[in-house]
Image (cartoon, rainbow, N blue to C red):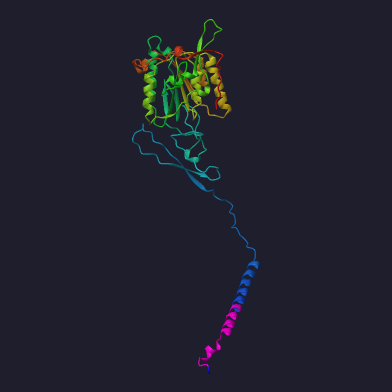
Amino acid sequence: MPDSRPFYIRWFSRSRFAMVIGISLVIHFIIGIFFGGAVIFDMLTAPEPQLEAPAIPQSIDPIKREYKIKMKRSQQQSAAPLPMPIIAEIPSDLSLDNIDLSLSNPRSDVRIRGAGDGDGTGQGFGDGFGDSSGFELDLQIDFFGIKGGGQNVVFVIDFSSSLLEGDGHKESIMRAEATRVIEELPMEVDFGLIFFGGPAWPGMEDVRESADNWVYTRKVSEAAVPTTFRPKKWSRLPKVRWYGSDTGARKRALTAVRKTPTIFGTVFDVPMYMALTMNPVPDTIFFMTDGQCDPDRGINPIQKMISQMKAMGKPIPVIHTVGLGISGNSQLEQIARLGNGSTRFVSTEAYFRKNGNVKFPPTDDPVFSTSSNLEDAPIDKYPIEFKIK
């Protein structure tokens, strides 16, 4: 029977279809090899790239960066407008990524020191600050007629029982002057407070809190049996904190000045050590006493402390000393010279003539008895050994 299908269907058999598919695949394969080879050939034979840099000009202005110095307005001032930020342009070849110097907290190389001190910024900050005379900030503090100041100021105040001798005027003057200076502290100032007699302690704490580290010592070889006080371990002395004048600490400090009772003894070296080891180091130390001290517990160890600080590259505070009710004390003058400070001797009569009569009522707190509450130890049991770190 003859095949009645159309010619193209009868011709397009299975074998011929397979042959067409095979030929098509071969053709595509050949084309792929041709173009792939061309691409690979171009990649292998491409010329090396040549980089051309633009010509370096004779002078390139360094990248400028803006450093803002923020000025903190004192709350003691009138309602003057806030100062505009001072912008100084500094070349970027300095190895400084950012400088933000708040004049309310000048530490490190920028410090506000006592009156007459030569520290300042000089020309290091460029023309924006003018000549090398530095800049002035009105942060002066008057304590018993000595003017000093800075960002961090510590008051080391004698609370020895000798203030009560005679008519007790020295005690009233001490409390009145310490009260006044704390009340008038500029808001930008951070302050510390240290009280001392025989033992020494942070002013806003209680001497009893660290009494177990103190001993009452005697020179048993001498007939007069003079007495003194010393810590068992200098490393256990309480750390003195910095407090902001714009915080509630000011009120607590005033309460401590008015209410803390006096204590027996007068030793200079420990309270000065506590002040010199504060962190950061004080800009100014005001040291006030009405008494005398053996040089071995006064100027001699204090000189050693200053030498240790210099050897470590630490800044030396300005040290001002005040002798209350005494006409002279060579140790106070020597201590002040160690810190490039001043010494002033204040009589009760001169203070009353200038400020009027002052009188503080006696404190209600019980007096701390050093003779009955401290361990009695031979003087050679706890040697005077300290190290500024």
Residue 364 in percent (x, y) is at 35, 16
Residue 106 in percent (x, y) is at 47, 34
Residue found at the far right of this picture: 45
Q: Is residue 22 magenta?
A: yes
Q: Is residue 281 magenta?
A: no
Residue found at the far bottom of this picture: 1
Q: Quadrant of the C terminus?
A: top right
User: Residue at the spot x=52%, y=48% of the render?
Assistant: 63
Q: Nearer the viewer, residue 130 or 227?
A: 227
Q: Magenta stretch: dominant SS?
A: helix
Question: Quick check: 135 left or right of 382?
Answer: left
Image quadrant where residue 178 sits:
top left
User: Residue at the spot x=65%, y=67% of the render?
Assistant: 44
Residue 227 in percent (x, y) is at 50, 11
Q: Is residue 167 above or below residue 9?
A: above
Q: Is residue 336 above or below residue 38?
A: above
- The answer to whether any part of residue 339 appears in the image is no
Question: Quick check: 178 left or right of 130?
Answer: left
Image quadrant where residue 324 sits:
top left
Read off the magenta span: 3-26
Residue 235 in percent (x, y) is at 52, 24
Q: Nearer the viewer, residue 204 or 70?
A: 204
